[in-house]
Structure formats: C-alpha cells, structure tokens
Image: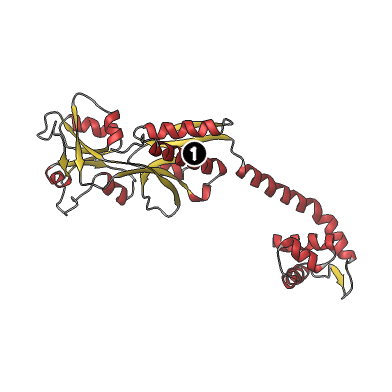
Amino acid sequence: MDFRELECFVVLSEELHFARTADRLYLSPARVSQLLRSLESRIGGRLFDRTSRRVRLTPLGERFLTDLRPAYDGLRGAVSRARAAAREVAGTLRVGFLATPTDAVTASVRAFERGHPGCATELVEIPMSDPFGKLRAGQVDVAFTLLPVEEPDLATGPALNRVSHRLGVSVGHPLAGRPGIGAEELAGVPLIGFEGPAPRWWKERTAPSVTPCGRPIPRAGAVATAQEGLTQVALGRGGMLFCTPTAEHHRRPDVSFVPVSGLPPSILGLTWVRAAETAVVRAFVEAAGREAAAREASGAALVA
C-alpha cells in the first residue's frame, strides 16, 4: 500500500477538514481527495462521510483507524529515529588513505576529533591498485584519494592540497641526483604502474602512457602497492611517479627522488559513496576543508 495514502487518512481523521489536512501535508486539497479516493478504492468501502459542511469517519473508517494507528505510529517512529541517527555526529568513522598518511591526512583527522570528541576515528590503508574497493564494500566511510574522481556513484569534497611529482629511480640510474627533469624526459624512463581493479583513468593518472606532448612512455610492469613499487625501483627495474609528500616520507638510501616539472599537479581530496553519505562523513569533509583553508592562509599548505 502507498504510505502517502495512509498518512493522508490518519491526518484527515485528526483534522476532519480537507484544507487543514492539505496544509499539514504540504499538499493541495485536490491531492488529498485523490489520495483518499485511491485508498477507499483499495479497501473497497468509504472511510469518511463528507458533505460541504462536515467530514466524519464512517464505522469502517473508525475500525480501520483503530487497526492502523499502532502500525502507523511505529513506522513514523522508525523514520524519525533513522533521521535523527543520520544527523547525529557520533560513533566511529573509518577513514581510508593511499600509501602514506601525510600531514594533510593527519591534520584533517586531528581537526575533526577536536570538533567532535564523541567520534572515534580509525585510519585504514587503501591499496593504490584498488582505490575505491573498500569504499564500495563499506570497509571505510570516507577516503583520501586523488581528484578529480570519474566514478558516478562516488561523491567528492574540495581539493585539500595540490602538490608536484617526483620520479623515483634507483641510485644507479642516469637521472639519479638530478635537481629536476621535465615531463618530456619521462619518454626515456620505463614507468612502473599499478595492476588490479583500479579504473583505467586512475592507472593513466598514476603512470601516464604518454608525455604532455604525446611522446610514448614505456612500461616497466605493474605492482599492487606503493611499497612493492619502491622495491622494484630500488632494484633498478623502472621508475615510478610519486607525489612530493609521499616521496619525502619514503626517503631511502637506494632510491633517488627527482622533481618533475610540466605534469599536472597531484590533487588530494576526500571521496565517499554518494548513497552512503552520513552526518559524520559530512562533518569530516567540512573539518578537513577548514583545516586545509587554515593551512593555506598561514602559508603552511602542502604545496611543492
């Protein structure tokens, strides 16, 4: 049965007036009449006696109201409790991060926890080879990912930082130790990419197949995680692109990180499943956005 019809019947039984019922339900009186006729047709009898002067329940209507009221009140209560829970900023929020929990990640978490002491936050690593799998499986509620995201079922927040890239190569590589290279020089460096269920656009963004001018970039295999990629780089089996904060975090004696100019910046932001958005997720996105704005205003934004 149509819940709107039942709601119309209950409210009309309280008001015994079509115009007041319409006002309470934000409907027109004609729509109220239509819903009532439809309900009476389903039941097979008149629920109200109505004239130009008065509206009253029929004996059938009184009996139907008595039977319906407990179930109707229960449904309304369930909806109200669900709405309240959706608005409540409490519980545990699972936050995903890629490869490394950089300063942008930890600063966002601290800002959220300061503003919402009733919430606990858990950090969960997300593999670069499957950046959205844990989101869609419900294993994390919101995740730090690269923007823009080209997935229609996912929503994104504002950019939290924009950073440059560095090319990781073994210390024995001809480019090791250089103060910087241009993006076109990547045509001479076989790049390690990511395997797995990551969408094609994601793989292209993390390991481009061509330079900005269209020169092909050779491939050097694929890995599942950034740590696997670093191991391949250290062994001299190819180069790998990293955002600058991640490169700084993973400094090691057998890998040289060379700044790369001429590539679009790596943009970090928050992503979540559109249909699973909650008040807690919205609160975290807002806290992260405020924190990023404050860092930028103070000159501490992670831009390199």
| Residue marked by disc 1 | 287
> In the figure, is residue 303 to the left or right of 6?
left
Residue depicted at 68% across the width and 44% down the height: 81
Q: Which residue is at the front of the view, 60 or 270?
A: 270
Q: In this view, does 121 lie to the left or right of 186?
A: right
Q: Which residue is drawn at 47% across and 30% down?
A: 110
Q: Which colour scheme is used?
A: secondary structure
36 and 67: which one is in front? 36
Q: Choose top left, top right, bottom left or bottom right for residue 253.
A: top left
Instruction: Out of 253 and 63, give the one closest to the viewer.
Output: 253
- From the top left corner, tell me how far across and down residue 4 is, in percent: 70, 62
Q: Pick out the residue farthest to the left.
A: 174
Up-down: is 253 above or below 259? above
Task: Indicate the quadrant containing the N terminus: top left, top right, bottom left or bottom right.
Answer: bottom right
Q: Which x, y percent locates residue 184?
A: 14, 47
Q: Position of residue 178 (x, y in %)?
A: 13, 34
Q: The residue under label 1 is which amino acid type? A: Ala
Q: Is mark 1 on a helix, strand or loop?
A: helix
At 40% from the left and 43% from the top, the residue drawn is 269
Indicate left or right for 54 with 189 as reference.
Answer: right
The image quadrant of residue 40 is bottom right
